[in-house]
């Protein structure tokens, strides 16, 4: 069987995975979706209690919305902000149940390896054109499927970053694992009994941490013995709390303002300049240490420190990853927070996401590697472009248009913090010689009297959000609409 007649295998049945299947199908190709969990949106369900930063209007892939409407689906109030659980139940489940997609999705099918048929990663001969071989567990039984293309949309939710400040677990973190939760536990809901009346340390300075802190503050109002401690690595909260009323994602801005108010009212005890390097069990509770700094004893730790990609299933294929972000090498300069802090990225698709093994793509949140704040709309555009590319329509594949939101905080407002990052900021004035093309274009635009790429705050963890899509008359280096 020719590789071109084989199916396109998509790993993961989340929002981007299902959108990929639909766009592939629209191109006359056959998608097969392998989902490790028992239902769609398995990863999203883990933070189903969290309200998204954007309204329903921007949570729905256009092609998916049209298909659902053709089956009589009534869209939710497009201006309302859904929770993750609502997106799964009101959008993903109906989409997966359509006759167009239902036969293409296999549940409880956990992919354990992707390779080239009869080729390990070392073998060059006849590699191009050789089908992929995808091995997965079907309810515990090993199976294989041959594929012309593999699209990995498996996400990062199963790979949380540790609380330790050096990229590895702090000393004692593994031993204290029964007292540490990662990500965004439902502290006000299902996990309420675990945290009510306890001394809780939240580690992290992104919007995952904000959600946990906000819910803990509500819990504190009902369980007065609850203590909330917050450890951040920055020397102050000025950049951490975001753009407030200037944030184009209203819910995100309001969340930052809410946390600022809780801090001001001493509901949350803030500990800055903290890089957790040791966690000790003592008779008084867990003690987190950062160099010579010792934090107060606590009962529970929530590490809201973001997520990282797990590429173990792709170990036998050829990837070209940026050594820092772990995203595709061509994508990294557009999203790396060490180079710029724009809340927007330039349009990107199949070209930027390709790897040395042709027809292999990593999409969605996993495509960003460790870079912050993946936006769901970006994932929909990625898979639209990729579907066009594998169908041979490169004109459409390259025509990726994307406008993402900005926040009102520009890195140049914080010249006293993190000066290295400032020097190469897309929002930070003249671009140094070693800066990437995005920053150079930004500096040139500003020199000509134009508004450059816009301003944004960097966020150290990944949160799904949606932004309004519009086709701008001209795009800046980071993809936001600007007028001359």
Image (cartoon, rainbow, N blue to C red):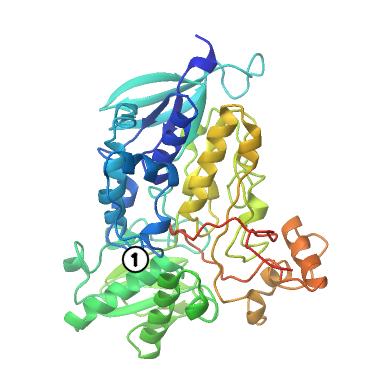
Is 341 displayed left or right of 241 in the figure?
A: right
Residue at point 32% right, 75% down? 214
Q: Please name the residue shown 55% across and 57% down the image.
A: 470
Q: Position of residue 20 (x, y in %)?
A: 45, 37
Left or right for 450, reference 335: right
From the viewer's perspective, is residue 459 above or below residue 226? Answer: above
Residue at left 49%, top 74%?
A: 274
Q: Is residue 272 visible?
A: no
Q: Position of residue 391 (x, y in %)?
A: 56, 27
Residue at figure coordinates x 62%, y 71% from the top left: 455
Label 1's element? strand
* Picture coordinates of residue 44, whole percent (x, y): 33, 51
Eyeballing the image, is 28 above or below 40? above
Residue 347 is situated, as x and y percent measured from the top left of the image, at: 62, 51
Report the residue marked by disc 1. Answer: 302
Graded by Cα atoms within 10 Å as few (under 14), some (14 to 19) or many (20 or more), the crowding at tag 1 reads many
Which image quadrant for residue 428? bottom right
Residue 39 higher or lower than 143, as above or below: below
Q: Up-down: is 338 above or below 21?
A: below
């Amino acid at each position: 069987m020719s590789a071109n007649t084989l199916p396109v295998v998509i790993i993961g049945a989340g929002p981007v995975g299902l959108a990929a299947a639909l766009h592939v199908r629209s191109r006359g190709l056959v998608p097969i979706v392998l989902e490790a969990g028992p239902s769609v949106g398995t990863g999203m369900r883990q933070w189903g209690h969290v309200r998204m930063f954007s309204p329903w209007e921007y949570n729905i892939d256009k092609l998916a919305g049209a298909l659902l409407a053709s089956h009589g689906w009534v869209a939710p109030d497009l201006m309302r902000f859904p929770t993750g659980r609502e997106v799964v139940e009101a959008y993903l489940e109906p989409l997966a149940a359509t006759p167009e997609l239902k036969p293409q999705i296999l549940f409880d099918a956990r992919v354990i390896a992707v390779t080239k048929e009869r080729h390990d990663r070392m073998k060059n001969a006849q590699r191009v054109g050789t089908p992929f071989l995808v091995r997965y567990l079907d309810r515990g039984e090993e199976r294989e499927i041959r594929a012309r293309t593999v699209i990995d949309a498996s996400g990062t939710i199963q790979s949380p970053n540790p609380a330790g400040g050096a990229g590895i677990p702090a000393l004692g973190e593994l031993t204290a694992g029964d007292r540490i939760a990662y990500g965004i536990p439902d502290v006000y809901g299902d996990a309420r009994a675990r945290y009510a009346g306890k001394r809780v340390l939240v580690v992290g300075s992104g919007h995952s941490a904000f959600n946990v802190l906000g819910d803990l503050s509500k819990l504190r109002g009902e369980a007065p013995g609850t203590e909330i401690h917050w450890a951040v690595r920055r020397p102050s909260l000025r950049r951490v709390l975001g753009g407030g009323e200037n944030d184009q994602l209203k819910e995100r801005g309001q969340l930052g303002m809410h946390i600022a108010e809780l801090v001001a009212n001493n509901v949350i005890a803030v500990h800055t300049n903290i890089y957790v390097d040791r966690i000790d069990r003592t008779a008084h509770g867990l003690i987190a240490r950062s160099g010579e700094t010792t934090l107060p004893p606590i009962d529970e730790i929530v590490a809201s420190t973001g997520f990282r990609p797990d590429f173990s299933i792709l170990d036998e294929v050829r990837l070209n990853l940026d050594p820092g972000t772990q995203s595709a090498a061509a994508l990294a300069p557009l999203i790396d927070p060490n180079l710029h802090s724009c809340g927007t990225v330039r349009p990107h698709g199949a070209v930027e996401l390709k790897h040395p093994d042709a027809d292999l793509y990593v999409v969605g949140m996993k495509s960003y590697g460790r870079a912050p704040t993946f936006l769901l709309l970006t994932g929909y555009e990625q898979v639209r472009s990729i579907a066009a590319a594998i169908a041979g329509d490169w004109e459409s594949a390259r025509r990726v248009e994307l406008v993402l939101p900005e926040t009102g905080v520009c890195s140049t407002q914080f010249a006293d913090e993190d000066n290295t990052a400032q020097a190469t900021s897309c929002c930070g004035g003249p671009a140094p010689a070693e800066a990437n093309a995005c920053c150079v274009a930004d500096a040139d635009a500003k020199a000509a009297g134009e508004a450059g790429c816009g301003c944004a705050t960097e966020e150290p963890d990944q949160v799904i959000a949606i932004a309004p899509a519009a086709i701008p008359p001209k795009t800046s280096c980071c993809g936001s609409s600007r007028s001359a």
